[in-house]
Image (cartoon, grey):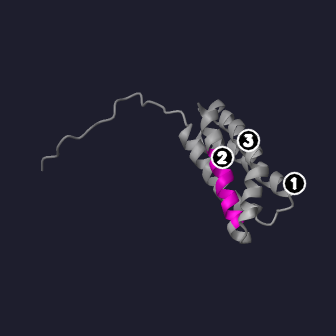
Amino acid sequence: MSVGKGLLLGAANVLVIAIGIGAMSHDAGVTALVVMFGGIPGVLAGGVIGYLAGLFAGLPPAVRIAIIGAPAMGVVFLLAEAFWISDPALVACIPTAVATLVLERWTRRRVVPPVPVAIVRSMSA
């Protein structure tokens, strides 16, 4: 299940980055090129990172963010260097960081409290 979530967020991340780089360069062709060359690696990396998120679902959120955020940022920088567009790589990390936080929250293991939560029905003064 978490792999599918990672694939979905990876695809969304590639699209957001492509639109952003295309808007920065004022060329719609750049958007298509980023989707063509970054789409498959971005989606596959999203699936692997989603697998990692599911694997480490029981760890504290800060640790999970580090575990799934570092490879995500690494893929962005590797793809930027591979295609000689390292200038917008830092800007491209913004949607990647957001996708990382969404994936962490979306795949977090819910812990049921051992004591039932108290519910206040009414308060009389």
As shown in the figure, which amino acid type bears the numbered disc 1?
Ala
Query: For residue 41, which quarter of the picture?
Result: top right
Which amino acid type is marked by label 3? Ala
The reply to whether callout 2 and callout 1 are in contact (CB within 8 Å) is no
SS at badge 1? helix
> Dot 2, how many residues are within 10 Å of its Cα: few (below 14), some (14-19), or many (20+)?
many
Looking at the image, residue 106 sits to the left or right of residue 15; the answer is: left
- Give SS at disc 2: helix
Q: Which residue is mark 2?
A: 11
Instruction: Check the picture and name the quadrant holding the N terminus.
Output: top right
Against 89, residue 36 (above or below) is above
The mark nearer the N terminus, 1 or 3, is 3
N-terminal of the pair, mark 2 or mark 1, is 2
What is the distance, in whole Å, between disc 3 and disc 2 at their CAs? Answer: 10 Å
Residue at 87% in and 61% down: 84
Prevailing SS of the magenta stretch: helix
Q: Secondary structure at mark 3?
A: helix
Stretch in magenta: 9-22
Is any atom of residue 70 visible in this view? Answer: yes
Q: Specify few, some or many for label 3: CA neighbours under 10 Å numbering under 14, 14-19, or 20 or more.
A: many
Report which residue position mark 3 lands on: 45
Left or right of 98 in this view: 72? right
Residue 2 located within the stretch drawn in magenta = no
C-alpha separation, residue under disc 2 versus residue under disc 1: 19 Å
Residue at the (75%, 63%) spot, across then down = 29
Q: Amino acid at mark 2?
A: Ala
Residue identified by numbered label 1? 82
